[in-house]
Image (tube, helix red, strand yellow):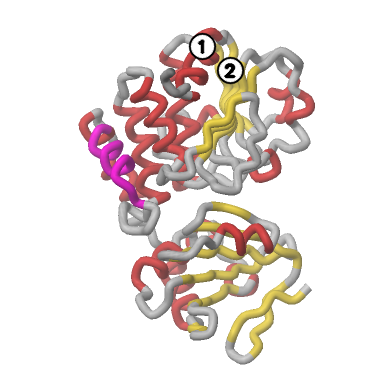
């Protein structure tokens, strides 16, 4: 008896639906933005009545993506009648920013959960959580591939965005054969790789580079933990518009070039009184560590957020409540 393919179940549900709500992750990055706009673009092409929701505004550096202007943060969309609701790249409703909104959905819908986080809580009626995938965009690519759906240049650009960002442009430990294959197919379909590079990599301002320099100047290595750590304080970021976007990618960069240690952690104070931690590793399963700190993520790329501030003790940053 042939094994069931859940991506066929997803296709059946979406094909039969007239109205679909697509939800991007509440902590938007290249993978969540790319996967959600890719699926949305196909549904629009199929003539479905579809809306695209994200609990926070779209980061400005993703405005090159097609359909990004169609995101809404209006929670009233959860009060409408939907045949299918699809969450992309969220490990749990709380991480996706819709934990308090999901109960407002009217009965009769099918909730589809597409993701690749090992910490995913399987909160959908249909759960496709491919932890071996390099990105949720790879999961969506597999959906298109398994159901013989042709890519256009818009969908291909969205998919390529997540493939690139979640693999640090095919340099980190999450890079796999299927992701590289998907990138080739997306390129052949007209993906605008130059746009991705221009907006997400070759986009550092002088102020942003100074922040990176500050983070690099504070690097410390703990041989007992085989951990390289650095930090940015709230005062380092104050008065700089788009400071959060400026320092995105520091942990990925360090993990790719810092050969002295297996694991890298970047701590950053936030204006809401929390400290955000981004952890990257070459060989260790750091998702377990992130979960123990109240976060989650992938085996090689994870994060967490804790109430408190950063204090430096013995040259190492410590989160103090």
Q: Which residue is mark 2?
A: 20
Label 2 sits on a secondary structure element that is: strand
Question: Horizontal placement of 162 versus 308: left or right?
Answer: left
User: Relative to the observer, which residue lies in front, 289 or 149?
Assistant: 289
Picture coordinates of residue 95, whole percent (x, y)? 65, 45
Q: Is residue 178 magenta?
A: yes
In the picture provided, is 306 more to the left or to the right than 245? right
Count of marks placed on residues: 2
Residue at 60 percent of width and 65 percent of height: 277
Specify few, some or many for label 2: CA neighbours under 10 Å numbering under 14, 14-19, or 20 or more. many
- Would you say 105 lies left or right of 124 here? right
Q: CB of mark 2 within 8 Å of CB of mark 1? A: yes
- Residue at the spot x=73%, y=60% of the render? 272
Quadrant in which residue 41 is drawn = top left
Image spot of residue 120 (x, y percent):
60, 43
Q: Quadrant of residue 318 in the image? A: bottom right
Q: Nearer the viewer, residue 45 or 150?
A: 150
Across and down, in percent, residue 279 comes to 53, 64
Tell me the element at label 1: loop
Q: Is residue 36 placed above or below 201 in the rendered structure?
A: above
- Does residue 133 belong to the magenta stretch? no
Q: Is residue 100 left or right of residue 259?
A: right
Q: Is residue 162 above or below residue 12?
A: below
Residue under the point 50% across and 32% down: 36
Determine crowd level at label 1: few under 14, some 14-19, many 20+ residues with C-alpha closer than 10 A: some
What residue range appears in magenta? Answer: 175-185
3D distance between C-alphas at marks 2 and 1: 7 Å
Q: Is residue 179 above or below residue 18?
A: below
Q: Quadrant of the C terminus?
A: bottom right
Q: Which residue is mark 1?
A: 48
């Amino acid at each position: 008896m042939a094994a069931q393919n859940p991506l066929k179940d997803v296709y059946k549900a979406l094909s039969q639906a007239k109205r679909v709500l697509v939800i991007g992750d509440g902590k938007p990055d290249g993978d969540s933005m790319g996967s959600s706009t890719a699926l949305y673009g196909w549904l629009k092409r199929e003539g479905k009545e579809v809306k695209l929701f994200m609990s926070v505004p779209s980061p400005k550096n993703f405005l090159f993506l097609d359909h990004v202007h169609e995101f809404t943060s209006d929670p009233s969309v959860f009060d409408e009648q939907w045949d299918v609701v699809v969450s992309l790249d969220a490990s749990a409703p709380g991480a996706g920013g819709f934990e308090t909104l999901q109960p407002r959905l009217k009965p009769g819908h099918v909730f589809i959960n597409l993701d690749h986080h090992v910490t995913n809580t399987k909160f959908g009626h249909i759960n496709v959580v491919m932890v071996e995938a390099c990105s949720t965009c790879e999961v969506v690519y597999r959906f298109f591939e398994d159901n013989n759906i042709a890519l256009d240049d818009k969908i291909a650009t969205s998919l390529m965005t997540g493939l690139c960002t979640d693999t640090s442009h095919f340099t980190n430990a999450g890079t796999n054969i299927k992701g590289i294959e998907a990138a080739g197919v997306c390129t052949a379909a007209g993906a605008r790789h130059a746009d991705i590079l221009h907006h997400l990599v070759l986009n550092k301002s002088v102020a942003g580079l100074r922040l990176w320099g500050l983070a690099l100047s504070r690097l410390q290595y703990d041989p007992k933990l085989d951990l390289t750590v650095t930090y940015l304080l709230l005062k380092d970021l104050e008065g700089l518009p788009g400071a959060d976007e400026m320092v995105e990618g520091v942990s990925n960069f360090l993990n790719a070039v810092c050969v002295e240690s297996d694991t890298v952690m970047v701590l950053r104070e936030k204006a809401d009184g929390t400290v955000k931690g981004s952890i990257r590793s070459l060989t260790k399963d750091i998702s377990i560590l992130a979960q123990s700190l109240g976060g989650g993520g992938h085996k090689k790329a994870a994060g967490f957020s804790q109430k408190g501030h950063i204090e430096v003790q013995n040259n190492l940053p410590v989160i103090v409540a």
